[in-house]
Amino acid sequence: MRDVAIVAFAQTEHTASDSGQSEPELILPVIEEVKERTGLRRFGFTCSGSCDYLAGAPFSFVSALDALGAWPPISESHVEMDGAWALYEAWVRLQHGDVDTALVYGFGKSSLGDLRSIMTLQLDPYYLAPLGLDQVSFAALQAAAVRADRAELDAIVRRSRAAGRDNPYALDLPDELTDAVAPSRASDVAPSRASDVVPSRASDVVPSRASDVVPSRASDVVPSRASDVVPSRVSDIEPLRASDVAPITDGAAAVVLAAGDAVAELCARPAYIRGIAHRIEPHYLGMRDLARSASAADAARAAGVGKGPVEVAELHTQFAHEEIILRRALELPADTVVNPSGGPLAANPVMAAGLIRIGAAAARIHDGTASRTVGHAAGGPCLQHNLVTVLEG
Amino acid sequence: METSEPLVARHVLEFPGGYTRTTGPVIGRFLTELRAGRIVGVRTAEGRVLVPPLEYDPATGDPVTDEYVEVGPAGTVTASAWVQEPRPEHPLDRPFAWALIRLDGADTTLVHAVDAGDPKALRPGARVWPVWRERREGGITDIACFRPEVTMIVSPVRPEYRIQAGGALRTFLEGVRRGVFLGGRCATCAKVYVPFRASCPECGTRIAEQVELPDTGTITTFAINNLPDPRAPEVPFVSAYILLDGADIPMIALVGGVPAHEVRQGMRVRAEWVPESERTLSMANVRWFTPTGEEDAELS
């Protein structure tokens, strides 16, 4: 196996609401940052992770390539998954031995639509999606299966939010757990009649000067103040409470992988990937024991989590109870610090949040504050698919 | 003119009419059976019954057998989540539970909605039955929802009677029509009973002597009632035992004109009569007893 290391990591200062940036505008700063950090302008391979349903536009990841400078043509791939799986693909690509560097990025704006029902679209179309089973609903079923203690869940959320307040890239969420952290639905701030809907987005909105705005109908473009987009309460689905749910977040992240001699040239303290594996379980919720994550446990064993101490584990926990399940599955020792970045409960840019876990785990090695860390990413309903990385200095 | 206001537009992603999807033989069989009002699972090579059926055994990856097994229709809840505020896309428009349901005869659980009425009605282990949609199309929502097993029924009881007040009761009510409480004194025991009655409950002697009692008295005990009653004006209302001055046993009546929490034993009260023109042969002539404002009486 060829040694591959994470040599650079950058992330946006994530936002709880739409700042109006296009996706290329969102990712450009993090691409620039890792280019600057490594001095690289071109990469042997490029891979990204995103989800078209977040933007509601087919092939939205293609337009995001504008941020890269893809001419002359680059070797590029994309996964319709969290950027963590783009990192996995890039790691596999570097195993081929013919290229030594790879750029990986993930991005997502979950503020644009209703994430709960967008996540219904990932469910099987025969048995689950027709029920209208939304993201918080299926997570609540898993929380019920875990029978987690309320005080333990609240402690996880408070600890995550406190860590997030210390993390300049995460959101500032209050210690008080009654506050909701989801923005209102798009339909709350936009015209509600079907006839107001126009087929093409690009033509509707935001040319460079305001005087260029010529909407096809006056109602197409609706000026609004930031205060119009107020957080609306996420209703509890017992046993889940609104505070157990990761906040709606927009953001992006980028990682540079290197192999061979390039590693030492690009980074003073590289974070070597000593193990990386992903495993998946049956999709249908009733075919699994939701109280456990067999796939996370398998991935952790395959990645070799237990072969040494784990100082820091960054876990992709989009719901508080998932931390309880993942701690057990990864068999993390009691002294492992979980999600010192705040984790997704403090900032959850969907499709980047898993990659950020790996990046944050690598950053602890880059800055010399840890020598062995674990990054975890999850996909699918109720932790269906899990990826585990072990990083060492 | 430059503007700093955000420019926001609505954008809807829709596939008009929806995608068409082939079901394959296994899911198709399940959905066809659902349309016919039956729930089937498929048997795996290892003998487990998957519900809903899949084409491959998730545990081994082997193709399943072609043996379909009717399961349920009832099942047992293994976990549930309570939705207090349903969303438009949810199967029910009132609070309901999502549940994992192990149908009788199945080795896996089915995800569906349970119209349980109350989150407490759906502990793990609760038994539920499907509610079938009248018009079925061959989809998972042909089962409209599940409902908890029947463990209780409601038995209405409402016979009607015609009651005639003759004898002592009529004598008493005639007094009430005049605005007077009539009691009777036992010649043997010397006790005064109100309402008037034909015989002494203590010694059995026939009571001959009528006594007109005042409409003032003392509360000996009382109850605050939180269930509505057609005879009471509002909830909560207070019913009390009132010992009329000169009587030896208390009479039950409503207490009003005072907050329920201020009513106390020993409180002095007076009957509040309806106007003379409205009086009938009925206790309704007394609206209620209301505090006189006098000092509380000592109760022996």
Image: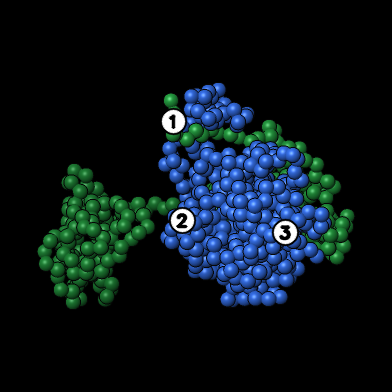
Q: Is residue A147 above or below residue A220?
A: below
Q: Is residue A140 visible?
A: no
User: Judging from the image, what secondary structure is the residue with disc 1 in?
Assistant: loop
Q: Chain of mark 1?
A: B
- Which mark is first along the chain, 2 or 3? 2
Are the residues flagged by discs 3 and 1 from a single subunit? no
Q: Say which element carries label 2.
A: loop
Q: Secondary structure at mark 3?
A: helix
Out of A145 and B39, give the one closest to the viewer: A145
Residue depicted at 62% across the width and 44% down the height: A54
- Residue type of the residue flagged with mark 2: Asp
**Cα separation between marks 2 and 1:** 29 Å
Q: Which residue is mark 1?
A: B3
The Cα–Cα distance between marks 3 and 2, rounded to whole angstroms, is 38 Å
The residue drawn where x is 69% and y is 74% is A306
For this rendering, which residue is in front, B258 or B286? B258
The amino acid type of the residue labelled 1 equals Thr
Report whether mark 2 lies on the same chain as mark 1.
no
Q: Which mark is residue A262?
A: 3
The colour of chain A is blue
* Subunit that carries the residue with mark 3: A
Marks 3, 1: nearer the viewer: 3
Q: Chain of mark 2?
A: A
Q: Is the N terminus of chain A in the top left, top right, bottom left or bottom right quadrant?
A: bottom right
The relative height of residue A285 versus residue B280 in the rendered view (above or below) is: below
Query: Which residue carries the number 2 mark?
Result: A172
Residue type at the position of mark 3:
Ala
Using residue A61 as the reference point, say whether residue A245 is left or right of it.
left
Which chain gets the green colouring? B
